Amino acid sequence: WQLNFHNDNVSWSTINKEINDIPWHTLFNGKNTDTCIKILLSCLLMLCIKLIPRKKPRSKSKIPRERKKLLNRMKMLKREKHRTYSKLKEKMLEKKIHETETMLIHHRKEERRTKEKKVIENMKNNPKVLFDYINKQKIEIQKLAHSKYKMNIFMTKKKFVNCW
């Protein structure tokens, strides 16, 4: 079972009280360590199942709706640009693609600002939020650097380099 120990509804005081109320001396009296460990683990498992809520699966997409729409628009415009024959329409599509890219960048900046505000607000109550935010930023930077490095190896000025 996937239990959510970080949930706010977990009452640790009741769990401690339940553990203290169990007569451990009578349970472990005259038994070897293997059976004592099995009894202890089974008691703790039953308490956890009884008092700790289960984890809920994430059904919601992590990509925000607005960004998803912009990304789909980019795909559509690039597809349309690839199909066109006239230079005039191609330039118009390039302009639209550029506009959507700027909108995407703006949306990401706004999201970053809101996340930073939330982190600053919750920093006093829960300092782990700050460290979690910093670690996520480091991971994003590493992914970005890795993808840019790959792009520099395989792509040069919109032409695919034969790397074999």
Image: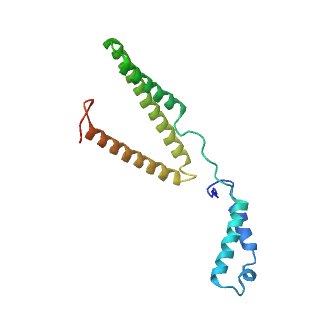
- The percent coordinates of residue 70 (x first, y second) are 47, 27
The residue under the point 26% across, 41% down is: 153
Give whichever of 25, 79 is nearer the camera. Answer: 79
Q: Residue at x 47, y 31 (%)?
A: 107
Q: Is residue 117 above or below residue 6?
A: above
Above or below, comparing residue 1 to residue 107 in the picture:
below
**Where, quadrant-wise, is the C terminus in this rendering?**
top left
Say left or right for 39 vs 82: right
The x and y percentages for residue 141 are 38, 45
Count of numbered labels shown in the rendering:
0
* Residue at the (52%, 54%) spot, across then down: 128
Identify the colour scheme used. rainbow
Question: Which quadrant of the structure image shows residue 76?
Answer: top left
Residue furthest to the bottom: 30
Which quadrant of the view contains residue 31? bottom right
Q: Which residue in the rendered view is the most extreme toward the front?
A: 164
| Quarter occupied by the N terminus | bottom right
Left or right of residue 121: residue 12: right
Residue drawn at x 48%, y 33% is: 110
Q: Position of residue 98 (x, y in %)?
A: 37, 23
Task: Tell me: residue 3, above or below residue 97.
Answer: below
